[in-house]
């Protein structure tokens, strides 16, 4: 069984997008993260030292979303995943970034990208 810390519907106003107007006016982005880690010791000890502090998870997500503009939602999700995997005790992460105000020429609730990443080296043609 895999333990997870989950933060849902974090909202940030960022200036990301392919279009220049998106980078000028900005928009809200929503982020969900699932951090896979062993929570057994924390659950038994009731001690913050044995878990992943979700305040730090939030700060790292916030730093990416409020940071330098990126063209692609994929790049936002990838950077969030990378920063979370740098944390002690984090074995894997799932990151979803949602862009609710996307113009596709018709009604749509949001566009989203979800990535799942594990600790370890990146391999294959997608590695940059």
Image: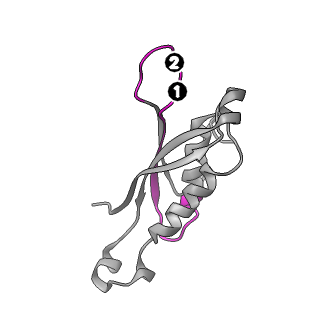
SS of the residue under disc 2: loop
Q: In the image as oriented, which residue stretches furthest toward the front?
A: 25
* Residue 37: % across, % down: 40, 65
Q: Which mark is residue 104?
A: 2
Question: The N terminus appears in which quarter of the rendering?
Answer: bottom left
Q: In this rendering, is residue 91 above or below 48?
A: above
> Where is residue 100 drawn, in percent x and y?
47, 33
Give me the C-alpha separation between circle 1 and circle 2.
Answer: 6 Å
Q: Quadrant of the C terminus?
A: top right
Q: Residue at x 71, y 47 (%)?
A: 68
Which residue is at the front of the view, 100 or 5? 100
Nearer to me, 66 or 42: 66
Relative height, residue 47 to residue 68 (above, below): below
Tell me where residue 74 sits by quadrant: top right
- Residues shaded magenta: 83-109
Q: Is 54 left, or right, of 28 in this rendering? A: left
Q: Magenta segment: does it hold 126?
A: no
């Amino acid at each position: 069984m895999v333990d997870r810390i989950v933060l849902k519907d974090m909202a940030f106003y960022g200036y990301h997008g392919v279009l220049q107007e998106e980078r000028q006016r900005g928009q809200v982005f929503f982020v969900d993260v699932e951090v896979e880690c062993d929570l057994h010791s924390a659950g038994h000890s009731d001690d913050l030292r044995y878990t992943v502090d979700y305040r730090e998870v939030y700060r790292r997500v916030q730093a990416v979303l409020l940071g330098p503009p990126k063209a692609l939602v994929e790049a936002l999700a990838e950077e969030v995943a990378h920063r979370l995997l740098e944390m002690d005790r984090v074995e894997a992460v799932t990151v979803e970034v949602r862009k609710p105000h996307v113009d596709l020429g018709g009604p749509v609730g949001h566009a989203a990208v979800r990535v799942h990443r594990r600790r370890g080296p990146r391999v294959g043609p997608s590695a940059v």
